[in-house]
Amino acid sequence: MNCREFRRKHDGYVDDTLSGVEVEAMTLHRRLCQDCARADTRVRRALLIAHNLPRIQPSADFGDRLQTRLQHERAIMASHSSRHGFGEGRWRLPVSGTYAALVAGVMLVAGLALTVGLREPSTIRLAPVVASLPEPAPSTLATAAMIASMPAGFSVWPAVQVAQQAEWHFAADVTGR
């Protein structure tokens, strides 16, 4: 897998809609390519922040006030368009000042895009991760080939992962840890 293919399939990777073989290839590429790993981290952190934002609750009369305002604006637009001949299938060309403003706006946006695009991206520094449990021994139930052959949405998928750690959980119950 190359970086272009990784970026193209990244949405499916994050949403867990790829096949097991593709997920494994994406994971391997992410481990080997630092640029793609950083991009994946940025996307996942942005999604985490977006999902944790508080919900905005509009006021009780917001819908009524919005509809009233929309009707008012439509009436203004209708009167403006009928006064200037826009509503009858005709339209006037904008004056040269409008074109000048449009060109200036496009040039401003292009200049901003170039200056933002030419800056070097800032490095994301992650906090160190400390493992609290040792990694369980590989299970004979959940081999990479078996997991890769299952589609991501198949109902056996969580059961295979639970079965992979079953020995650890049973051992913890017996020893009282």
Image (cartoon, grey):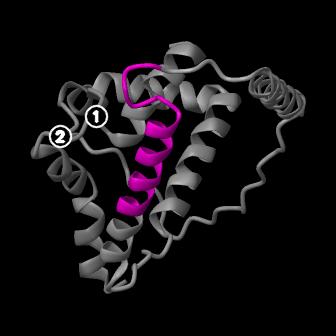
Check contact, mark 2 vs mark 1: CB within 8 A.
Answer: yes
Q: Position of residue 106 (x, y in %)?
A: 77, 25
Local crowd at mark 1 within 10 Å, few (<14), some, or many (≥20)?
Answer: some
List the residue tagged with mark 1. Answer: 17
Q: Please identify the residue farthest to the left as the structure is shown.
A: 155
- Residue range corresponding to the magenta coloring: 70-90
Question: Which is more toward the observer, 174 or 25?
Answer: 25
Q: Earlier in the sequence, mark 2 or mark 1?
A: 1
Instruction: Tell me which amino acid carries mark 2.
Output: Gly
Q: Quadrant of the C terminus?
A: bottom left
Q: Is residue 91 left or right of residue 143?
A: right
Query: What residue lies at 56% left-to-right and 31% top-to-bottom?
Result: 30
Q: Is residue 128 above or below residue 39?
A: below
* Residue 76 belongs to the span the image colors magenta: yes
Majority secondary structure in the magenta region: helix
Query: What residue lies at 73% left-to-right and 23% top-to-bottom?
Result: 95
Question: Which is more toward the observer, 86 or 30?
Answer: 86
Q: Secondary structure at mark 1?
A: loop
Q: Is residue 174 left or right of residue 107?
A: left
List the residue tagged with mark 2. Answer: 153
